[in-house]
Structures are given as structure tokens and as C-alpha cells.
Image (tube, rainbow, N blue to C red):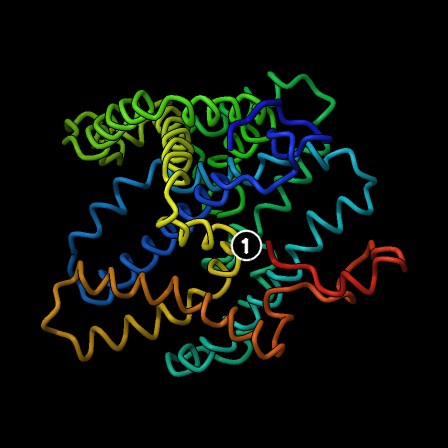
Amino acid sequence: MPFAAPLSPHNPTGNGTGARVDWVDYAKGICILLVVMMHSTLGVEKAAGATGWLGLVVEFSRPFRMPDFFMISGLFLGLVIDRPWRRYLDRKVVHFLYFYVLWLTIQFAFKAPGWLAEGQTPADLAGNYLMAFVEPFGTLWFIYMLPVFFIVTRLTRTLPWYFVWGSAALFEILPIHSGWLMIDEFAARYVYFLTGYLFATQIFAIAAWVRENPVKALGFLALWALTNATLVFAPVPGSIAAFGLASYSKLPFVSLALGGMGAMAIICSSVLLSRFSWTGLLEYLGRNSIVVYLAFFLPMAVTRTLLLKFAGFLDIGTVSLLTMIAAASGPVILYLAIGWTGQGRFLFHRPAWAWIDKPKAAGAAKIRLHPAE
């Protein structure tokens, strides 16, 4: 699927057809698997008090795992950023707020009995629940941050792009560690979201080049993998470790460069993988990445507990891998079951009552639910 025209509101995919861009779904599929892998692996290792081989993959992907996710999230913003404020807020703020509140409540319902058993009082739980509207909760911080990015980008769109991007890059470079996740993650991630928005045309041009030059793209991937691995795993001298940095990849400027290079590497990989039909599962996961993101916590926790209790003959890396597979597939199974039965669609589709800019009467019958993605 070569790209013959640049990205524009009249040509949203950059290919002149209006069709869905396959490599974008592949990129999202890779990213959601990396996110699930991280949470699954770190959870298993913490519970077991030991490390496993999958932890090496988690550490290798740390510099680019979230940068690429946010870059892809900003990629199509240019198509809708000039919509009327009411519609923009509905699609880019209320939409994600609905799923955040819903799944925050679901997670609290599952975790509350354990917290009570640990000695927390109902008042403690209520306070923690309310605090989650100020400080993002657990794995849900991504969909909490997206509306913030959408609003900030809308408010600053008339400023010179180089000033806004330069400021965002400076935030990433500076050692901002306030202790508040919203502030710290905004500083660390906004530059990548903004890059997706500002440089969408160039990113699609790179994807088109990769499709036409697969051998050269593989050469870039090999060079990038070697560079990333070296900067992540090479021992650091005491002069650097004294600042609490255990890896060259966390150094100022280096982390920004690795985030950008890694995001480009994921895009290259996605374009190359999209050439093969047997990789279609990645595309499916990408199309439903938010479904996986919202619901993977429960199958992950259940699988981790069962494997650590009854599969002691397995090494920690294998336990982490099996936990990751269950965590990623569980939400998909639930989503398919909901589609088959028609029950519980509100879990992954925003119902009409949660809209503040409802479709006109002519289309309301067709759009009763707005999918999570």
C-alpha cells in the first residue's frame, strides 16, 4: 500500500484512498505488547523476588516503549484539531474520561478486598479513589494523560511550532522528578506526542520510504538495535552512577534521542511486518489496543498468582511470558464475547448518554456506541 500523497484532512491516511493505515495498527500492536510485557514481567519478578530473562527485553524496550505509543497517538491530530470546541472536547476529553472513570472503578472494585485485608479502612479507600482523579491510577495513566496532551496542543497550536516543540524537548531533557506522576510524565512524554502531530507528513514519508527500501530499512534497524542495546546495557562509570543513573540511556539528550530513534524503529518494523499476512495478529491487537490496555490488569494478576503458586518448575522468564500472553489475550477474548452476546458493550464502547456532542438525528441511530479507540 504505497503512499502517493501527503497527509491532509482530505487524505487522512496519506494514500489517497481513505483506507485504514495498516502499519499504524501494527505499531500500536507492538507497543501494547511491550506495555503488557513490562507490567507482567515486573509484577512477576516483584512477587517472586527474582529476575528472569524477559526482563532484558523489558529493559531494552524502555527507551522507546511509551514514546512510540504517544507519537502514534498524535499522528492524526491534525485532521481534527480545528473542530469546534464542543466536538473536540467530546472526542478528545470526555471520550477518554468515560473509560478512565469506568475502569478506575472496576479496578478499585477488584482490589478493594485485598486492601481492606491489609488494614486500609473504607475511608482510606474512598480517599484513594478520589485522589485518582488528581493523580493517575496505576496502569490507567496513559488514557489520563492523552486528554491533557490534546488540550495543551489545541491551546498552543497558534504559537510557533519550533517554540512549542523546543519547550517540550527541554521538558524531556531536564531532570524533572516532582513526585507527581502527571507532571513527570507530561514532561517526559509530551514531546513525542507533539512530534507525531507536527511531523505527521514526514513520518508517513518515512514509512513510504521503508516500504520501498526494505533492505536499507533492515540495515537501519540493525544499527539502531546495536546502539540502543549498548546504551541501555553498557556498565556506567561511578561518576554517572553517583547521579542515580544506572544506564547511559537515561542521560539527558541521550534519552530524547533514543526515544525518537526507537519510535522510528518501531515504525520501520511495523511497515516491514505489514507485508506478511501471518503477522495479522499484531494488526488486530493494534486496532484494539485500548481494549487490551483497559482490561489486561485482571488476567495478568490472576495468571501471575496461579503460575507462581502451581508452576514452580518454570523459570521466572517463562512465567513472565505466559503471564504476558494471558494478559494480552484475556481482554480480546472478553471483547469477542461481548460482541457475540451483545452484553457489556459499555465496557469498551462509549454509550450515547456519555456524549456532550451527540450525532445529529439522521446518524444517531447508527452511532449509539463510540468504541474505546
Q: Is residue 212 above or below residue 367?
A: above
Residue 231: quadrant of the picture: top left
In the image shown, does 158 or 360 lie closer to the viewer? 360
Q: In this view, does 324 lie above or below 175?
A: below
Residue that numbered label 1 is attached to: 135
In the image shown, does 264 or 161 lie closer to the viewer? 264
Residue closest to the far left: 313
Secondary structure at numbered mark 1: loop
In the rendered image, residue 252, in percent from the top left (x then y), is placed at: 36, 25
At x 46% / y 35%, what residue is drawn?
188
In the image shown, does 202 or 309 lie closer to the viewer? 202
| Amino acid under disc 1 | Glu
At x 55% / y 26%, what residue is drawn?
3
At x 42% / y 33%, what residue is drawn?
267
Residues packed near mark 1 inside 10 Å, few (<14), some (14 to 19) or many (20 plus): some
In the rendered image, residue 306, in percent from the top left (x then y), is placed at: 26, 77
Q: Is residue 351 above or below residue 343?
A: above
In the rendered image, residue 182, in percent from the top left (x then y), is placed at: 53, 46
Q: How many marks?
A: 1
At x 37% / y 34%, what residue is drawn?
272
